[in-house]
Image (tube, rainbow, N blue to C red):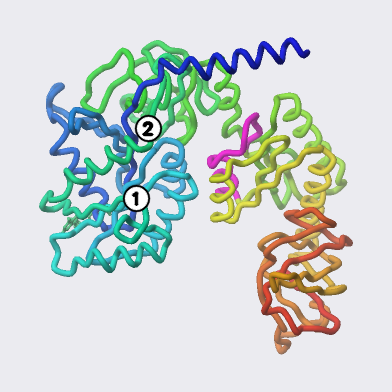
Amino acid sequence: MAENKTIRNKVVANDTVNTSQETIRPPVVTVMGHVDHGKTSILDAIRKTSVQAGEYGGITQHIGAYQIEHNSKKITFIDTPGHQAFSQMRARGGRAADIVVLVVAANEGVKPQTKESIQHAKAAGVTIIVALNKMDTAGADPQNVKQELAREGVMVEDWGGDIISVQVSAKSGTGLTDLLDAIQVQAEMMNLKADPASELEAVIIESRLDAKRGVVVTVIIKNGTLRIADEVSASGYNIKIRSMMDHNGKMLKEAGPSTPVEILGFSKPPSVGDLLVQKGSELAELAIDENRVEIIGKDTKRTVAIVVKADTQGTLEAVKAGLAGLVSEVVGATFSLKFLRASVGDITDSDVLLAQGARGIVVGFGVKPAPNVADLADNLKVTVKTYQTIYELMDDVKELLEGTAHDAEAKIKGRAQVLKTFKLPSGDIIAGCKVLAGALKEGSRIAIYDKDPADVTKEDEPLYVGQVKKLKKGKNEVPLVGKDNECGILLKPQFEGIAGDLWVEVR
Ligand code: GDP
């Protein structure tokens, strides 16, 4: 044992020293912002001035990304057509891009999708550069926009922050060179590196079925080199690369880090945001179960969607078997359990997005979400729970299933009695409750009455309306508490002063 450990340490040490293969790679840039603020115009303008159109057979290809050369150095742009599903955008932005160019029309300022873009860029931990566009318009007011951005926590350089901002006009072309310079300065500061000789890691940014060509997939290589005839895996499919083409329509034999390429060889479209890796590699094991959907329990009214992540294949199998057992154990259950994904590895943004899409939850066993993934889950209000023992996990999920079963039976969301309340130093109030029916969930909207909600009529006004910020069972934070259980719910300070016999209704 001890010897093994020493060997392993040596290997790790060697790996750390042996980074001579790592070379600077071009930055991968994605453009985000409010509709009509000029994202497409900026991408088109850059593409037109910097890409040698027609170099290869007179056609530039729209493959979902392109690469330009500026100051003799390359930059890769993800070239999102139209207004694709924002969640896909997030998935690929988060995994594929190094830099987000946040486009804000200088004559309009911060709008709802600007705010959304800021949240997603932050959650994904991607560096922001601000492009103040439409500077040619009469109403352009860059100072005002910078102030609005500061309110959203985006502090540009002349507001004392470190976010670069550039004033541009996609229409006249002014400032676009400055924008490209800024991207390169930022990339240099980020010291982006990759090793063309290391194991392949590429991110799928486009995936579609073409009537003539079959499944057409665009990937951006993050690490390693992709070669024609390589055997690779993505979204659980193993395939051989049949052909590979760049954004100029040039056929390639191989492509290195940060290069976007269109590949053929898939018979079914893999998922955008998933990784493309060498078949049989260690990374392939992480990617293999992606998007495999399995449903346990049939012909039921309700489905609980769940993403399971575990530290090893062995624990993963144990967790899955345990959960399947739970379903068959609850006799006459009116629900089923749907595994959206069950795979080995840390909890990633793609897990959170998958759960969000299905209104499901993410559970991890012996693994953790990375900090930016936890932020994303918070922003999207997706419950992510991690466990160290299988008993805890089973208990929680059992409660969740039972809560759901009761829900379905009674057609009510939940009802609880307040046993006592106490105030925290923060001013928040904890209400100790007993669940009488249904379930209380983290994030549930609740109303508090001075009578049992079962007796409440339309005339009765609730004493307090709010949201369950946190839910605790004993010392542990839990996502849900089912019938006959006691729990503590965290309420805002506004609840203070409400006393007497109280009941909670889950809305
Ligand atoms: P997107 O929805 O963010 O991709 O925005 P588009 O690139 O489609 O641009 C929306 C509209 O704004 C179009 O009518 C563009 O012609 C116009 N537009 C884009 N950039 C500029 C600019 O710099 N100045 C002016 N005056 N109009 C622009």
Residue beneath disc 2: 191
Question: Foreground residue, 107 or 485?
Answer: 107
Q: Is residue 204 magenta?
A: no
Residue pictured at 33% horizontal, 54% vertical: 33
Q: Is residue 343 magenta?
A: yes
Residue beneath disc 1: 32
Residue pictured at 83% horizontal, 41% vertical: 326
Q: Residue 434 is drawn in which quadrant?
A: bottom right
Residue pictured at 57% horizontal, 45% vertical: 371
Viewport quadrant of the N terminus: top right
Q: Tell me: residue 428, above or below residue 12.
A: below
Q: Tell me: residue 308, above or below residue 259.
A: below
Magenta extent: 341-358
Whether disc 2's CB lies below 8 Å from ligand 1 is answered no
Question: Foreground residue, 340 or 384?
Answer: 384
User: What's under tag 1, amino acid-wise?
Assistant: Met
Q: Give residue 173's position: percent from left, percent from top.
A: 12, 49
User: What's under tag 2, amino acid-wise?
Assistant: Asn
Whether disc 1's CB lies below 8 Å from ligand 1 is answered no
- Residue 219 visible somewhere in the drawing: no
Quadrant for ligand 1 reads bottom left
Q: Residue 421 is drawn in which quadrant?
A: bottom right
**Which numbered disc flags the more N-terminal residue, 2 or 1?**
1
**Left-right relation of 26 to 405:** left
Cα gap from disc 2 to disc 1, whole angstroms: 23 Å
Q: Give residue 482's position: percent from left, percent from top.
A: 82, 58
Question: Foreground residue, 140 or 461?
Answer: 140
**Label 2 neighbour load within 10 Å: few <14, some 14-19, many 20+:** few
**Label 1 neighbour load within 10 Å: few <14, some 14-19, many 20+:** many
